[in-house]
Image: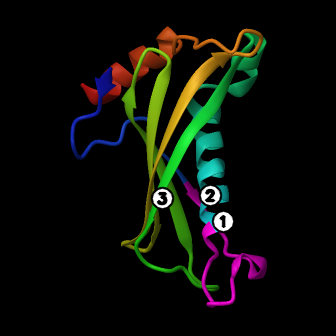
């Protein structure tokens, strides 16, 4: 397992989010379900930039989300301008841990950890992380 040194954020992506009126719950802040959607958007961006889904699918491989942990630190309200950041904190033979934070300005509003695995679509057996991504990750944590 390759593990990023503390304080580093290898393969990081960022996305701005717009809080929509339908994102707001009865307590006047962003509903917890919205954070899960934002994490999915961030994970899709990680794939787009570092492990393109079309190439994976052409190899009969799919990225599968194994688990998500979210810690809410501060509520986000209607006119806030949140930004999401996600990076790969560790990389195994067939697995990856993605960490994320959603911030407004410099205030961290939520942190998350997502664990994922690559599976062969036909057999549902784990598939190794592509070597080019492993090499890119090694370079990023060096």
Look at the image and tell me in which quarter the C terminus lies. top left
Residue 28, quarter of picture: bottom right
Which residue shows up at 46% across the image and 29% down it?
Answer: 96
The location of residue 29, given as percent across then percent down, is 60, 84
Q: Is residue 54 left or right of residue 82?
A: right
| Residue 33, numbered circle | 1
Look at the image and tell me in which quarter the N terminus lies. top left
Give the magenta-colored segment's residue range. 15-32
* Magenta stretch secondary structure, dominant: loop
Residue 22, quarter of picture: bottom right
Q: Is residue 111 left or right of residue 128?
A: left
Marks 1/3: CA distance? Answer: 11 Å
Q: Is residue 138 left or right of residue 101?
A: left
Asked if disc 1 and disc 3 are in contact, CB closer than 8 Å, the reply is no
| Of pointers 3 and 2, the one earlier in the residue sequence | 2
| Residue 36, numbered circle | 2
Which residue shows up at 76% across the image and 82% down it?
Answer: 21
Residue 30 drawn in magenta:
yes
| Of pointers 1 and 3, the one earlier in the residue sequence | 1
Q: Is residue 109 left or right of residue 139?
A: right
Which residue shows up at 59% across the image and 53% down it?
Answer: 39
Q: Residues within 10 Å of mark 2 (few under 14, many from 20)?
A: some
Q: Is residue 51 above or below residue 68?
A: above
* Element type at mark 1: helix
The location of residue 51, given as percent across then percent down, is 60, 25
| Residue 70, numbered circle | 3
């Amino acid at each position: 397992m390759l593990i990023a040194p503390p304080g580093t954020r290898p393969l990081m992506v960022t996305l701005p989010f717009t809080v929509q009126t339908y994102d707001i719950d009865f307590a006047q802040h962003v509903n917890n379900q919205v954070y899960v959607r934002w994490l999915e958007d961030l994970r899709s961006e990680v794939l787009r930039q570092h492990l393109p889904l079309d190439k994976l699918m052409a190899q009969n491989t799919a990225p599968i989300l194994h688990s998500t942990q979210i810690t809410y630190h501060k509520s986000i309200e209607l006119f806030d301008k949140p930004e999401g950041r996600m990076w790969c904190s560790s990389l195994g033979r067939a697995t990856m841990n993605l960490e994320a934070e959603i911030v407004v300005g410099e205030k961290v509003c939520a942190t998350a950890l997502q664990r994922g695995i690559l599976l062969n679509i036909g057999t549902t057996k784990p598939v190794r992380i592509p070597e080019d991504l492993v090499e890119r990750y090694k370079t990023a944590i060096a």
